[in-house]
Amino acid sequence: AQTVTQSQPEMSVQEAETVTLSCTYDTSESDYYLFWYKQPPSRQMILVIRQEAYKQQNATENRFSVNFQKAAKSFSLKISDSQLGDAAMYFCAYRSVGGADGLTFGKGTHLIIQP
Amino acid sequence: EAQVTQNPRYLITVTGKKLTVTCSQNMNHEYMSWYRQDPGLGLRQIYYSMNVEVTDKGDVPEGYKVSRKEKRNFPLILESPSPNQTSLYFCASSPGQGRSYNSPLHFGNGTRLTVT
C-alpha cells in the first residue's frame, strides 16, 4: 500500500514571500500521479496542481509549482508571492495508474499567511 | 455547471438512528468514492465504485454501506451511527477507464456529521 507523508503540520509565511510545503511518498509502482489539493475554511477541496510520474518536467500553475524528485519520492509545492487567499490546509495526494483505489492523502499542512 | 452535489451539508443525529447522505454528479463519471476527514488524519477512503453495481471497500469501511444503482448517484448509508462516525464526509468522482484515472477527483462540498 502507498503512504503519503507531510512532515509539516503547520507553516507560516509573510505575504508576498515564497513558501515550500513538503511531501514524501512511498510506493513500489513506477507509474502514478501526484496532486496537491487546497482546502480553505469553506471546506471545499480544490485542485492546485498535478504531476504525472512519467513526466520529468515539473508542473507549474501560475504562482504554484512543484519540485518532483522521483528517485527520492519527493513532491514539494512551492507557492510564490504568497497571498492572503492562499491561507488553507494543503493536502498532498497519490493515485495509482488505473486508480481504482482512489487517492491516498497525506495528513495535511496548515498554511498561515502573515499580512 | 459540472459538479458533485452532496446533501445535507450539516447533519446532527443520535446513536443508532439510520441516515443517508446523498451524492450526485452530473459529469457522467464512472468512478465515485466516499472519504471521511478527521483532524490530524487527512482524508481516508470509505468505499468506492468503478461503475454501476460495482462497489468495493476502501480503508475504513466498517459501519458504512453504499449502493450504485445509477451512474450519477452514490449514497452513503449509516445503518446504526455511532459517535466515532462524527466526521466531515466528502463524495468525489472522476472519469474511469485506464489512464483517465489520472484525472483528479472532483469533490462535493462536504457533509459535517455529528452523532451524539
Image (cartoon, helix red, strand yellow):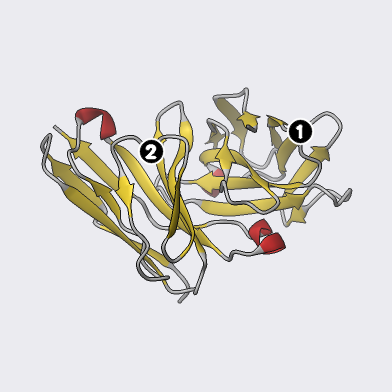
Residue A84 appears in the figure:
no
Q: Is the N terminus of chain A in the top left, top right, bottom left or bottom right quadrant? A: top right
Which residue, given by chain and number where applicable, does mark 2 sit on?
B61
Q: Quadrant of residue B79?
A: top left
B10 or B96, which is in the foreground? Answer: B96
Q: Using a 10 Å C-alpha cutoff, classify the residue at mark 1 as few (fewer than 14 neighbours), some (14 to 19) or many (20 or more).
A: few
Q: Using a 10 Å C-alpha cutoff, classify the residue at mark 2 as few (fewer than 14 neighbours), some (14 to 19) or many (20 or more).
A: some
Q: Secondary structure at mark 1?
A: loop
Kindly indicate whether the residue at mark 1 contacts the one at mark 2 (C-beta within 8 angstroms).
no
Measured as percent of width and height from the top left, residue B61 is found at 38, 38
- In the picture, measured across the screen, residue B84 lies left or right of residue B46, that is left
Measuring 56% from the left and 48% from the top, which residue is drawn there? Answer: A102
| Subunit ID for the residue under disc 2 | B
Q: Is residue B40 above or below residue A29?
A: above
Which residue, given by chain and number where applicable, does mark 1 sit on?
A28
Q: In 3D space, how far apart are the residues under numbered discs 2 and 1 (Cα atoms)? A: 25 Å
| Mark 1: amino acid | Ser
Measured as percent of width and height from the top left, residue B68 is found at 37, 62
Q: Quadrant of residue B5?
A: bottom left
